[in-house]
Amino acid sequence: MDLSTVTRFRPARERADLALGPGEALLAGGSWLFSEPQPHLTGLVDLTAMGWPDWEPGDGGLRVAATCTIERLQRAPVPPGIARLLREAADALAMSFKIQAMATVGGNLALALPAGAVISVAAALDAEAVVWTPGGGERREAVAGLVRGPGRTSLAPGEVLRAVDLPAASLAARTAFRRTSLNTLGRSASVVIGRLDEDSHVSLTVTAATPRPVVLRFAGVPGTQELDGALDGVDGWYDDPHGAPDWREAVTRTLAREVCDELAGVTA
């Protein structure tokens, strides 16, 4: 879509260039930005000109740049099981290959859609967001906390999402993935990702069915009673045209049991 009110475009080549003027917005892939009218915008600042590498080692794990596309993310140097999880999460949003080639990690997180592909996998891997703050500082926050609700994050005015750090322990873990939607190619109504760490601790991350990521943690693979008790504590289920709250809760419980059964099979 043409953004008819935009009259200025400038590349950001150094950190100082990221300071936005009146009417300006950051541009990365632009897959959402150009999808609907933005009458409040008069200028765009291109993040991709910063030249950040798609990924680089960090504390034994992997740092993924906010400007890395969903397509390139699926080629990141990670263990086979995590590579499969990245592909499953990308496909869960039902985006075309053209969108995957343009949409970015940072854009997906900042948009904060309940069914966001990067949100699901980043929260499930206990990833941390690296945020540049105004004045040259930096802060870190778990992705599961950065996303506060549909279209809402903790990012303050002037803050820029620089990267996402995937910890080494999570990259070494076993994972299981389930999703469902109202139709085969529809937007996800519920996504459940299980992670079995080397110390046998288990985390279950629910997205799409809830307004924000929900991470449930257990000392081992939970039984049905423990799992149901944890899901009873979920504070609200999402309601939109892609699924009613009661249905989302019911299918999430089914998916969670399937994920736990798969993880239990790994430990058997």
Image (cartoon, rainbow, N blue to C red):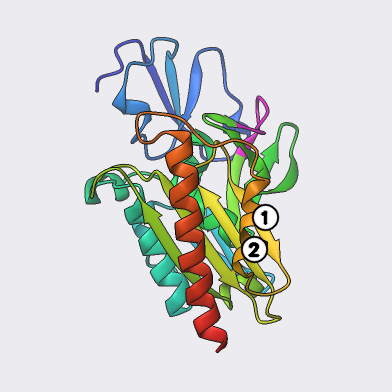
Q: Nearer the viewer, residue 26 or 51?
A: 26
240 lies above or below 199: above
Q: Is residue 65 visible?
A: yes
Task: Say which element carries label 2.
Answer: helix
Left or right position of 198 against 240: right
Mark 1–mark 2 distance (CA, rounded to whole Å)? 6 Å
Q: Nearer the viewer, residue 134 or 50?
A: 134
Magenta region: 153-160
159 lies above or below 52: above
Q: Is residue 105 visible?
A: no
Q: Nearer the viewer, residue 141 or 211?
A: 211
Crowd tier of the residue under label 1, counting other residues whose Cα lies within 10 Å: few below 14, some 14–19, many 20 or above: few
Question: Marks 2 and 1: in contact by CB < 8 Å?
Answer: yes
> On the image, numbered disc 2 is attached to which residue?
225
Q: Which quadrant would the C terminus be assigned to in this image?
A: bottom right
162 lies above or below 135: below
Q: Amino acid at mark 1?
A: Gly
Residue at x-position 65% and y-position 27%: 158
Q: Amino acid at mark 2?
A: Gln
Would you identify the image quadrant in which residue 33 lies?
A: top left
Query: Can you name the residue that lies furthest to the front here?
Result: 225
Residue at x-position 58% and y-position 32%: 149
Q: Position of residue 2 (x, y in %)?
A: 25, 19
Q: Position of residue 139 (x, y in %)?
A: 75, 45
Would you identify the image quadrant in which residue 145 lies?
A: top right
Residue 34 on the magenta span: no
> On the image, numbered disc 1 is attached to which residue?
229
Residue at x-position 73% and y-position 72%: 219
77 lies above or below 190: below
Left or right position of 184 against 121: left
